[in-house]
Amino acid sequence: MNLDALDMPDEPTQLAVWLEQKLAAPDLTALTDELSAFRKPSRGEAPELRELLGEWQELVMSDGLKQAPPEVVRRLLLWPERLLDLQELVYQGGGRYWDRVLGLASDPAEIVRDSRQRLSAVLLPAARPTTPKEQAPTVLPMRRLSSRRRLGWAMGLVAAAAALIAVLVSRYFQPAPIQPMPAEVAWGWNKPGVLASADSAPAYLNQLAKAADEWFDAKPKDAAAVAKRLTEFRRGCTALLLAERRPLSEEDDKWLMEKCRQWASKIDQELAEVEAGQVEKGRDDADETVHRLAAALRKRAEERDRT
């Protein structure tokens, strides 16, 4: 008898990698069944997946579970029925990191569909009328196991179940509050109204420079927080590239798009530095990038004021 949860590691980073590998397995329901079997009853309806992932959902989708705090992985283990939702989510919209983890050797839709069908078969067996024959089926005689074999099998099952209970209860099944889903990113170029049309080109460019300076309102230090901040700024670059810049001339619009692509590329490089462990360098380089882009926007605004 093989129990998937028995090889659960202790170290948080290894635990995240372990769970990623389980998500890539075609029979994820084996793990969800085991975890559900030892969960306390009457815990109410499971939170939505977005509540369990919280503000880390975007980072998890792009770079995997190990980028999120250990608490996120523990929440997922506390509510194993949401693991199927996570499996479906990463198959449908995971980044290149998940492509490597999942391998994509099989059809993603087929794997997810198979997992859900297996779980439904366990939790929601199809109701159908039974005939008298079905109510009292004929059972073929089986070879009787010896007492020694029955005892060995039973002892093995009890030992495995006891080990699983000890592992799960002592390490993971402690009550944990679910934090509310944070609001959408509301700073920098992501802030509502920042990219709206202004009265003039100088006003619009200065508006962008002021919003970019909001990068300095927070000073994250750990890798995950710095990466999150960079990802949010990078999202603002995309929003700016796709926005309508009505007060700008064709020349200024072309200039801004070229500059924005350059800034986005720099932010991508600095995010890569953070992911490679060069957290302080990545943050300092990002500070310099934002200083330069804000100065460039203000300089362009001054030039347009003089014309």
Image (cartoon, helix red, strand yellow):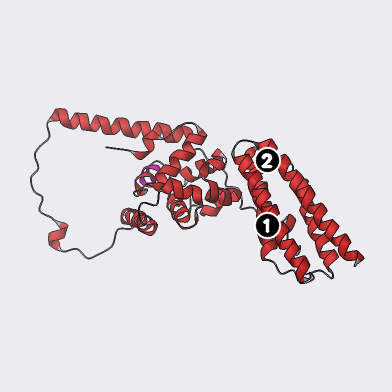
Res. 70 visible in picture: yes
For disc 2, the neighbor class at 10 Å (few under 14, some 14 to 19, many from 20) is many
Report the residue marked by disc 2: 282
Disc 1 to disc 2: CB gap under 8 Å: no
Crowding at dot 1, Cα within 10 Å, few <14 / some 14-19 / many 20+, comes out as some
Residue at 10% from the left image edge and 50% from the top image edge = 139
Q: Relative to residue 148, is residue 247 drawn left or right?
A: right
Which residue is located at x 23 percent, y 32 percent?
A: 154
Q: Quadrant of residue 305?
A: bottom right
Which stretch is magenta?
Answer: 32-37
Secondary element under disc 1, as helix, strand or loop, is: helix
Work out whether 181 lies above or below 39: below
**Pointer 1: what residue?**
261
Quadrant containing the N terminus in the rendered view: top left
Name which residue type carries label 2. Answer: Gly
Q: Quadrant of residue 109?
A: bottom left
Viewer-proximal residue, 224 or 234?
234
Please, what is the three-letter code of the amino acid marked with disc 1? Arg
| Residue 44 in picture, x, y percent from top left | 48, 51
